[in-house]
């Protein structure tokens, strides 16, 4: 997998959800903070996104707003419209409100939520702003627009055969296209952060190498050779862009892979250790406990009994 896909997969804890909703002015909905991420796409009309921090954001037809860490927010026809608080059981979305011919201006939204573990966010997602706003622009983000159209179509025709098997991949695709569009929009002169790292040939090749084979006995020198840079030049370039030294990131990623494997599979501890670059279970257990503050076996047991994080509900 590539780095962007890996970063999302590392945080995934459940199935995403989405719904098309139609609202008529005046309307306003407030969402409580949730352990996940959510998005709103304006398909028709306009509305205001009221974040937990910062100024209101006006969303027009075609605009996409992604909330990578749900701190709580509201969405309404105007910034001053009274808000109704929405609470839903974990994993459920509210039923869209039926339109009324006597209501005011119509806004059609495509809203959704992702179950993501925010306790250990990948730095690629952690550096995102609270709101990723992608304004509609003619000719921009063609892949993202196509994913939105396909998702909207499937939500309108959920009774067709195969609908449940199509929606989840489309939502995954939408998330990756949102992130790709955001990072692709960053100015060329920015030399630090994951936006620079993903598009820098040297650093990106080293990141791909780490993600493709985290169990390999990587050194700064061998990663530098992959990046076609000297050891010192590579270490300096990687640290400047990613924000951490190459081997520190390698260790962090190994522990992330190990935690996901322990949580999601029944793989033997020996196998988990080997797949993440450790020659013995003892060395792996020591490194894991240093990173998480708990032994691998206890981590696995605790992860199996924890409830899934709540999702961000869609506007209704």
Image (tube, rainbow, N blue to C red):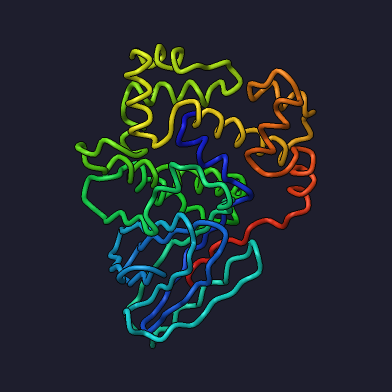
Total tally of numbered discs in the picture: 0
| Residue at 38% across, 31% down | 239
| Residue at 32% across, 79% down | 79
Q: Is residue 189 left or right of residue 89?
A: left
Q: Is residue 312 above or below residue 236?
A: below
Q: Is residue 27 left or right of residue 7?
A: left
Q: Nearer the viewer, residue 73 or 194?
A: 194
Q: In the image, residue 68 lies at what x, y percent? A: 45, 54
Q: Is residue 168 left or right of residue 53?
A: right
Q: Nearer the viewer, residue 117 or 79?
A: 117
Asked where in the image residue 310 lies, by quadrant, the reply is bottom right
Q: In the image, residue 238 lies at what x, y percent? A: 37, 27
Q: In the image, residue 145 lies at what x, y percent? A: 34, 48
Q: Is residue 24 above or below residue 278?
A: below
Q: In the image, residue 242 lies at what x, y percent? A: 39, 35
Asked where in the image residue 230 lies, by quadrant, the reply is top left
Q: Nearer the viewer, residue 86 or 240?
A: 240
| Residue at 30% across, 44% down | 141
Q: Is residue 161 above or below residue 38?
A: above
| Residue at 27% across, 56% down | 135
């Amino acid at each position: 997998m590539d780095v962007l896909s890996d970063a999302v997969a590392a945080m995934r804890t459940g199935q995403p959800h989405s719904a098309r909703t139609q609202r008529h002015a005046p309307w306003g909905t407030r969402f409580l903070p949730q352990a996940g991420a959510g998005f709103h796409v304006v398909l028709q009309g306009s509305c205001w996104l009221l974040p937990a921090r910062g100024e209101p954001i006006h969303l027009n037809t075609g605009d996409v707003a992604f909330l990578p860490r749900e701190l709580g927010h509201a969405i309404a026809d105007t910034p001053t419209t009274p808000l109704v608080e929405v609470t839903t059981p974990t994993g459920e979305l509210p039923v869209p409100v039926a339109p009324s011919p006597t209501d005011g201006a119509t806004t059609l939204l495509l809203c959704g939520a992702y179950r993501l573990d925010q306790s250990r966010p990948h730095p690629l997602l952690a550096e995102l702003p609270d709101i990723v706003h992608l304004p509609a622009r003619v000719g921009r983000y063609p892949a993202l627009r196509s994913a939105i159209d396909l998702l909207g179509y499937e939500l309108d025709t959920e009774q067709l055969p195969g609908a449940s098997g199509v929606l989840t991949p489309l939502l995954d695709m939408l998330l990756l296209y949102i992130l790709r569009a955001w990072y692709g929009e960053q100015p060329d002169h920015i030399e630090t952060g994951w936006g620079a790292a993903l598009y820098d040939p040297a650093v990106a090749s080293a990141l791909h190498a780490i993600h493709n084979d985290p169990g390999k006995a990587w050194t700064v020198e061998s990663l530098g050779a992959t990046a076609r840079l000297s050891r010192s030049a590579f270490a300096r370039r990687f640290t400047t862009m990613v924000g951490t030294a190459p081997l520190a990131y390698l260790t962090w990623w190994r522990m992330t892979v190990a935690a996901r494997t322990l949580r999601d599979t029944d793989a033997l501890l020996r196998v988990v250790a080997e797949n993440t670059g450790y020659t013995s279970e003892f060395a792996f257990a020591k490194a894991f406990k240093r990173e998480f503050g708990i032994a691998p076996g206890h981590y696995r047991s605790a992860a199996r009994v924890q409830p899934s994080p709540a999702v961000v509900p869609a506007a209704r």
